[in-house]
Amino acid sequence: MDIMFSIIIPVMFFFGLGVAFRSIVSGTAKRESREAKKALAEDREANFSRSVAVPNEKFFTPNLDYLNIKDYPNIQEDIVLSRLFESLERSANKKMIRLSPPMTNFEIKKTYGVVNLDLITTCEGNYYNYIHGLNNFAEALIKREQYDKAEAILKHCIVDAQSNVSKSFKLIMSLYEGKKDRTGLSDILLYVIKLDTLKHDADLKERILAEAGVIA
């Protein structure tokens, strides 16, 4: 009998575990199925939302002319800088939109109608291409110790284009730290703290301040 119980008890234990596991899996699958059906129904509803014209003021095309980038010394002779500038110039000539707060495809369709989805997502993509182009160009200038020009581009990126890409802030803070410019660093940190366009990007603001050593 003792031998039988020593065999039966473990078998029953593992059988019970198996039943419990199947129950959990089954419950999770049903919940996920309900959520998927709900999301599908909401998306289908959004596809029939009334189209609303996107306000013109939400779109913009940046102006790089005042930075005089094409007149920078050695830009034509430096292959890397020349290519980065050409890429930046191409992206700067495209219509852009910066959504604040960011919106999912479902939210865009619900707010502006499905016919505006491609327009908004394309223009938003143009915006991020432009921001990354500015960051890359400024980073290349920093490597070449052209700090003042890099600072001007990053200020344009952050203040004029209202970047919500953390690299923009990381580069300019690194630039100020390298120059030991405590005033510039202090100014950009105050700007980040007060920045209205980051009020919907709390995580980004926290990362920026953490990278600067302002918060733990």
Image (tube, rainbow, N blue to C red):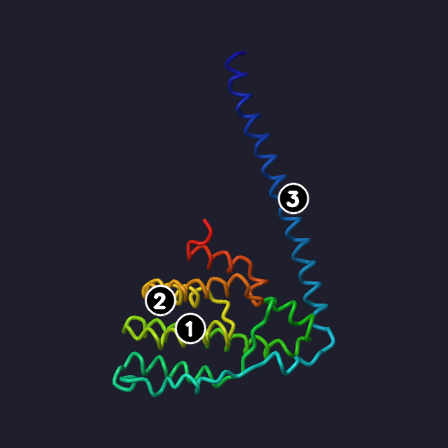
Callout 2–callout 1 Cβ contact below 8 Å: yes
Which of the marked residues, 1 or 3, is nearer the chain's N terminus? 3
Q: Amino acid at mark 3?
A: Gly
Identified at 52% across, 72% down, the residue is 162
Residue 17 rendering spot, x and y as whole percentages: 57, 32
Secondary element at tag 3: helix
Disc sitting over residue 154 in the figure: 1
What label does residue 41 carry, if any? Answer: none
Left or right of residue 6: residue 110: right
Viewer-nearest residue: 184 or 124: 184
List the residue tagged with mark 3.
27
Q: Residue 158: horizontal and vertical position, in percent? A: 48, 71
Label 1 crowd bin: few (<14), some (14–19), many (20+), radius 10 Å? many
Could you give the CA–CA distance between mark 1 and mark 3, rounded to whole angstroms? Answer: 51 Å
Q: Quadrant of the N terminus?
A: top right
C-alpha distance separating marks 2 and 1: 10 Å
